[in-house]
Amino acid sequence: MFTPFAFVKSAAVAAPVIPTSGLIAWYDANDYTSGATWTDKSGNGNNLTLNSTYSKNTTYGPTIFFNGGWGSKSGVSGWSATTDVTYIEIIRPTVATNFVASWSLTGTNQVTGFQFGGTSLIYTWRGGDTGWYLNTPTYGTTKTTFVARRFSSGFNNTGDSLVVDYADTSAISLTKYGSGNFSLGRAGGTTYSLGGSVTIIVGAAETNTTYDMPGYYGVVAIYNRILTDQEITDVYDAYKTTYSLL
């Protein structure tokens, strides 16, 4: 007599998908081998030109080690009708100091990701003026960090006009920090315009080493819109295993 039996087939789990709507540039160190070009995998052709001292490294996952170096791309369009920015980075700094920047977007005005007014503070800065920093946590030289900044012109500590999503390899899984979680760096304004032509710089605030932030750079993804919480989670999930994020 035939006895029917059942078997269970596990449903395939789809891999996290990097959001592409509004994607301006996407740099993944896994794509880099050598040379002066870090290819933009967004399809927009916004390849970074690497300068000064840099090298491929695999100690903390695939990274590009900027040690007195930076990457830049000028003439990047896409912000003429908006000041909305989502800037995502996976980075392990080698310095905990003041006046260093891991990135900048410079158009009509400049916005940057800065350490200022205290070591390792995670700032969102309006160049030449002021910025707000995350009260806790901070960058660290002994951990790889996932930092996603979501902001637009006039960002402050209210109305979720500035949101920083953070995770690291040490103690914190992906956590959203919004209104009430920031402190003002100094008196000033955060109103800005990017305009129709922007220079992207990764590893510094300028195309020199005056405000460079040495470290291991794994991933950068830049958008001209505010990503949703779920989209931030999708990016995080796509990379958390590669970079041993919690």
Image (tube, rainbow, N blue to C red):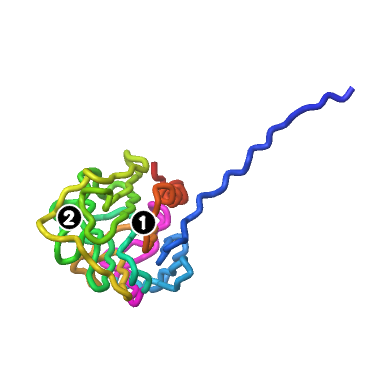
> What amino acid is labelled 2 in the image?
Thr
* Residue 72 in magenta stretch: yes
Foreground: 159 or 25? Answer: 159
Q: Which residue is drawn at 32% across and 38% down?
A: 171
Q: Count neighbours of disc 1 (C-alpha within 10 A) and say few if under 14, some if 14 to 19, many if 20 or more.
A: many
Indicate which disc, 1 or 2, sits on the residue closer to the N terminus.
Answer: 2
In this view, the mark in front (1 or 2): 1
Q: Which residue is drawn at 34% across and 45% down?
A: 167
* Residue 205 in magenta stretch: no
Compared with 159, 43 (above or below) is: below
Q: Give the image quarter of residue 75.
A: bottom left
Q: Where is residue 17 in the image (x, y as percent from the top left)?
A: 50, 53
Q: Residue 115 carries which label?
A: none
Which region is colored magenta?
Answer: 53-76
Residue located farthest toward the right when viewing the structure as drawn = 1
Q: Which residue is drawn at 50% across and 50% down?
A: 16
Where, quadrant-wise, is the C terminus in this rendering? Answer: top left
On screen, residue 184 versus residue 20, left or right, reads left
Alpha-carbon distance for marks 1 and 2? 29 Å
- For disc 2, the marked residue is 97
Foreground: 115 or 213? Answer: 115
- For disc 1, the marked residue is 226
Q: Where is residue 115 in the image (x, y as percent from the top left)?
A: 20, 56
Q: Position of residue 186 (x, y in %)?
A: 11, 56
Foreground: 71 or 112? Answer: 112
Q: Give the image quarter of residue 176.
A: top left
Q: Is mark 2 on a helix, strand or loop?
A: loop
Q: Position of residue 183 (x, y in %)?
A: 16, 48
